[in-house]
Structure formats: C-alpha cells, structure tokens
Amino acid sequence: MTVRTRIAPSPTGDPHVGTAYIALFNLCFARQHGGQFILRIEDTDRVRSTAESEQMILDSLHWLGLEWDEGPDVGGPHGPYRQSERGDIYAEYARQLIESGHAFKCYRTGEELDELRESRKAAGMHLALKPADLALPAEEQARRETEGWSHVVRMQVPATGTCVVQDMLRGTIEVDWAQVDAQILLKSDGMPTYHLANVVDDHLMGITHVLRGEEWINSAPKHQLLYEYFGWEMPALCHMPLLRNPDKSKLSKRKNPTSINYYRRMGYLPQAVTNYLGRMGWSMPDEREKFSLNEMMAHFDIQRVSLGGPVFDLEKLTWLNGLHIREDLDDEGFLKALMEWAFNEQYVKEILPQVRPRVETFSEVAPLAGHFFSGVPQINEASFDAVKLGREDLIKLLQFLVWRFEVVPAWHKEALLAEVKELSAHFELKMKDLLAPVFIAITGSSASTSVMDAMAILGSDMTRARLRHAIEVLGGVSKKQAKRFEKEYREL
Ligand code: GLU
C-alpha cells in the first residue's frame, strides 16, 4: 500500500499556522513511508471561500517548503483538486445514499427545526436532531416533494448505542450515537457539506491516512458511518493536538498572530517556522530543538506526538529563528534571505506609490517608510499626547477597530475604509480625528505615508498586532473595561 496523506484547507481568510502545522505532519508521515502528499482545496462554502485566500494558502505552504505531489496548481491523476469543481461527483454519491436508504431528503423548514430543537431541550435531551425527529408523515413528505419545496439531504444515523472509532494517537474513542445528528450531506443549493465531500474525496483520491486537527474528532463517527454506507475502507485517523496560546487557550487570532503572512512579513525564515511547527507536540529522538525539514522527515515517527496541547510561543520561535539566522546563514545567505524578505522588487513596488510623491531625496525614504520594514513600532504613552481623546475612548476606539478588523472577510483598503467610517459615525468623530491615533499605532509617527494604505499593505495580522501593541502601551484593557466595551460593541 502506498501511503497517501493530504492537507485539505478551506480558503476562507488568511493562511493559518495551524494549516501549515497539519500540512507539515502529513508531509513528514507520507515521506517517511515513501508515500505521497496531496493538497486539496475544500471550498464548498461558496460564501466564505475566495480565490485570493486559496492563492495565499498555496503561496504560504510553498514558502515554507511543504511541497505536495498533487494539487490544484500541479495537477495529478485524481483531480480536480478543488471541491467546487467536483459538484457532480458529490451529487451522484448523495443520490446513491438516498437509493440505498442511508440518506433521506429533508423538507423541514427552519422554523420547524427550531421547534424540534426546543422540544428536545425541554425534554432534557441532547440537541442533536435524529432522523426520527425529522421524519414527516408520508403524505406531507410527498406533498412537499411534489410542490418542489427547498430541501437538504441528510444521513441516517443510529438512534442509540455507541460508536467506536480508532485513532492512531488516542486509541479507541467512544461516542454516544444519541449525540450525533442526522448530518446534512447536501445543502439546499445542492452543494455538499464538508462531511460528504471530505469522505468522498479522501476515498477517490486514495488517501490512506488522515492526520488532522483535534477539532474534527466529533466528525469521525459520521465519517466512519459514511464509509460503511459506501462500503469503502476508511483511512486511518489521527487527530493532532490543537496549537495553543501561552495561556493554554486555543490559538486564535484574537490573542496572537496566526497568519503565515504575518510571520513572513515579520522576517522569520521559513525553515525556522517549519522547524518550530515541528516542535509542536513532537520531538526529535535526541530532543534537539533545531532541525531541518529533511531531518524531520528522516526521523519522523507519528507515535512521538504527545497530546498535551503544544504552546505556540512567539518568543521561542523568535529565539529559534535567531539560531537559524546566526548558525545557518553566511553573509551571502543572509543577504539573499534579506532581499527575498522585503527588499525585493515586488514589495518595493507595492510601497512605491506611497513613498514617491512624498520625497525629494532618497535619504527620506527610510525614515518615511520604515514601518513597512518593521514589526511593532517603538511607541509609548507619550506618543499619543497630541490625540484629542480621553484615555478610555482612545483605548476603546483601538479595541473596536481590532475587533472589526478580525472579521473583515477580504483585506482590501475599501473594506477597511468601510469599517473605519462606521466607527467614526459611532464615535461621532471626523475620520481625520479617528485616524490620528491609528496612524501612530501603525506607523509609529505622526507624519508618514497614508495609514489606510499602510494597513492594507501590511496585512491583517500585522495591523492588528500593532493596534494591540498600542492598546498595551496605553495601559491595556482592564477586565471591567473589557466587559463594558464588549457590551457597547455588540450594540454597534
Ligand atoms: N477543510 C477542513 C479544514 O479546513 C479539513 C478537515 C480535514 O482535514 O478533514 O480544516
């Protein structure tokens, strides 16, 4: 058997370090067994998926050196590798399941589903809707069908009993069937859900081992059942521990930069990031901290993954990056890496329109555009002295902006402008006054290039990291304040 693993990211937003982490382990597992590693884009969520996000994921993984044998950009014998291009395949498999009685068309309305959940809740039952809850009297089902009501396709699931799933790291996992709902397989628009598409594709693409994040454990019973329904062999499952913030909470962009774009912009070396991700829950047999991707592949053993939540610690990563820079780069290597980082034509061209109209000599470029080549700016409380806002309002404004920016679907200047405008209306501030502190937080000065353009160019995580840093130098948000802010923010 040829081992085949895959990474199956959904292209919704910035490329996440968690994706790179899971990709790395899948790649190492495949290579260690002389197998193949596949990249599949899971873009069945047509509202949230974007081509731009897909491109960023491909770019980031290439940057990290995590190369795949088959994928949407390189092709392969099992394509297409983008789920949005495989719609007919899923529809056909859903049809098969209906025919074999393993799935059913569900014509329940949203209101009915709410009522069903309410009554389960009132009866003290688990909220998972079961086929028996959803079934309609035969005539009603037939009427809705003839009248062409909107419907979804759901899978049959047992009402009672225990589902037993094997996990390569966790051994036997038991889940009560009562907690498992009659999962939607095809949505009312005919698009598959993750569950159907994932199972069908893993099978058709010959995936033998699924290494994925722990957050998917709850899906395993449904997937196992689907494999049984289809009469297919299920790949071995391995649920990797989730990356954590230093406070042990799940790694999230609310607290830490999670975008690979951020680490790239900050000037980390790809080999150091890969090395650090390799340290997440895994260690070399001799416990050495610094190693290359090739060394990791050579010594890889999935059983050395420990399940205690690995902490993604920026300080540790920075330390490791320093080792890579000092020990592995000679002058020439350093120069090359530095140029690739930000002193390259593409990046300089991007910031050129910001700089060119504002200088009379080249010697003004670095002071003016330094913020495009740095991390968080050197600022302190006094940097905000000229801002005409009370301390609490100032912090609140920055915090609201951070929250708004966390959910901007596409990081474009226009989208950011829309957010800023909305906040200026809320705070009853002129745009200029609202942007004054933002300007300082982002550029570190009160005279520089356009702040809106700077944020658009610097990217989401870098922008938010700078805004959060400004909040910190202004004294941070107390627990009490956070509560007040959140309440006001929710009412926005
Ligand atoms: N599309 C899923 C994700 O974004 C894939 C999960 C899996 O690997 O099964 O993580």
Image (spheres, rainbow, N blue to C red):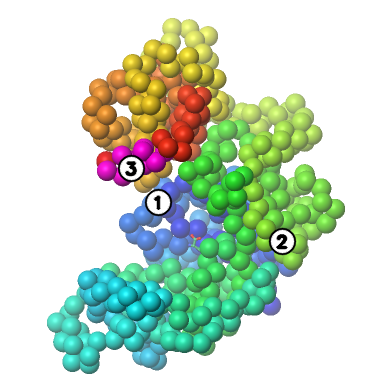
Q: Earlier in the sequence, mark 3 or mark 2?
A: 2
Q: Amino acid at mark 1?
A: Ala
Q: State the residue position of label 2.
A: 305
Q: Is residue 217 left or right of residue 326?
A: left
Percent from the top left, x then y, of residue 166?
Answer: 63, 77
> Residues at badges 2 and 1 in contact (C-beta under 8 Å)?
no
Q: Earlier in the sequence, mark 1 or mark 3?
A: 1
Percent from the top left, x then y, of residue 327?
Answer: 79, 34
Which quarter shows the C terminus? Answer: top left
Q: Earlier in the sequence, mark 2 or mark 1?
A: 1
Q: State the residue position of label 1.
A: 51
Most foreground residue, 425 or 396:
396
Under 8 Å from ligand 1: the CB of mark 1?
Answer: no
Q: Measuring 68% from the left and 27% from the top, which residue is drawn there?
A: 335
Q: State the residue position of label 3.
A: 487
Q: Amino acid at mark 3?
A: Lys
